[in-house]
Image: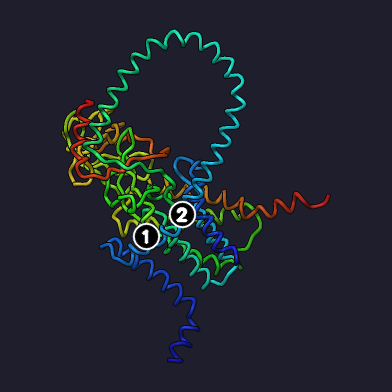
Amino acid sequence: MSVLLRLLARYRRAVILTTALVLSFLLMTLQVRHETAVVTLTRQALLFVVSPFIKVTAASIQGVTDIWRDYVDLRALREENKRLQLETTTLKRRLDQLQEQALETQRLERLLAMRQASQAEFLTARVVGKDATNWFKTILLDRGSLEGVRRNQPVLAPDGLVGKVVEVTPTSARVQLLTDPVNAVGGLIQRTRVTGIVSGNLGAGARVRYLPLLADVVVGDEVVTSGMGGVFPKGILVGRITAVERRSGALFQEATLQPAVDLSRLEEVLILTALEAREGIESGTRSRQ
Amino acid sequence: MNWFLPGLLFCAMAQAVLLGPLSVWGIRPDLFLLLVFLVSQRVSPEAATALGFLIGLCQDGLSGGPLGLHAFSDSLLGFLAARLSHHMYTDKPLALFWLLLGGSAAAGGITLALLTFFLGPRLLLPALFRVIAPEALYTAAVGLLILWLPQIRAALTRPT
């Protein structure tokens, strides 16, 4: 025993370095092959400890930004006041016409909201943090399993698809964006109904892969979710094609996709929490077309 | 080394929240890597390895990548930086910049190799030009500013 300890003490540098490297390698292997409880618990514990600080920091930054904005607004207020007084006279005349239109819009909005509420259940969440590396594209939300967030729930913004929930703690959730290199979403070219796989490409945009070589795909085509894979409901807008590549000898063609949502400026998102929402989203998108 | 835990917490906050508006083409400096460099200049190679592992693990916990990815590269870089710190000590800004650039690029290379091994082939050129090179440049520039700040302050306050 003493010999072993002496050997360990003598080669402690090599032992510590090897242990750290082997442990890292083991953690990665366990996670990539199949998610084990140890890895999941470690990730959740780390996120659980750090996420409250991230929330507080994000809230503080928001507070400071608001105060600064209010100050700037106050300075501009005096000049704006003069301009507004002139505008008031003109606006009064238009007001009567608009009041009638507003009443009609309100009625229609109420009907639409009622229809959406009956078919889909959304949870609003704030984006409080981003991925700590430049290799992956994920965001951290301020809602967790206590509010009903679960893994693989789709995350949307008013303009289209954002990604899916990949990690949940009681008070926070991590969302893998559709531009993440590891992400894969079943996509459908809306005009020609050709299917492909949307995935990230280490840049700001995304790629649509495995499009049949002879498929009709042109720049400007809109891509929606295909519904295949069982994670994303069919018909959610993913983005628009900005370039098509047909390489000689390749079995498939590829396209560059500009996401419909500006993923670098996300502040609030919607988490799709109910299963019956699938039909709601699909019919909602179709009705807009 | 009383500043290690607050420093780690600050890096986590900055990397996840504060650096968002400072990102250039979606790339932010790797503050965790700078922390590894700072720590490795002040402790033994054994401690630098262990602390590098801890820093990397924290970074992995706040990222969507596999746990252990940055723990691997940070523990290795921590060990090497601590081991070579006596031979490579310099206060010349250009040398410091190249040192940080090399270290950051090496960390990126290790990450790319590990990702290729575990998650399938990555496109080398996009990874090199969209992630590794800009991240190394940005990290080195920010690192130079942080590491050289005490000297700038001393030069400014020196009596003429």
- Please give the label number shown on residue A52: 2
Instruction: Give the crowd class for mark 1: few <14, some 14-19, many >=20 residues within 10 Å.
Output: many
Q: Total marks drawn?
A: 2
- Please give the label number shown on residue A44: 1
Task: Determine whether B112 is above or below A281 in the image.
Answer: below
> The residue tagged with tag 1: helix, strand or loop?
helix
Which chain is mark 1 on? A
Q: Amino acid at mark 1?
A: Gln
- Seen at 42% across and 61% down, the residue is A46
Q: Nearer the viewer, mark 2 or mark 1?
A: 2
Q: Could you tell me if residue B76 is visible in this image?
A: no
Q: Nearer the viewer, residue A16 or B4?
A: B4
- Seen at 61% across and 68% down, the residue is B86
Real-space Cα separation, disc 2 to disc 1, in angstroms? 13 Å
In the rendered structure, which disc, 2 or 1, sits on the residue that comes first in sequence?
1
Task: Determine whether B74 is above or below A216 in the image.
Answer: below
Q: Position of residue A190 (x, y in %)?
A: 20, 31
In the displayed structure image, the side of residue A118 where residue A145 appears, left or right: right
Q: Could you tell me if residue A282 is visible in this image?
A: yes
Q: Position of residue B50 (x, y in %)?
A: 48, 70
The quarter of the picture where residue B42 lies is: bottom right
Same chain for labels 2 and 1? Say yes or no: yes
Q: Position of residue B154 (x, y in %)?
A: 74, 54
Which chain is mark 2 on? A
Which image quarter is the N terminus of chain A in?
A: bottom left
- Seen at 50% across and 57% down, the residue is B32
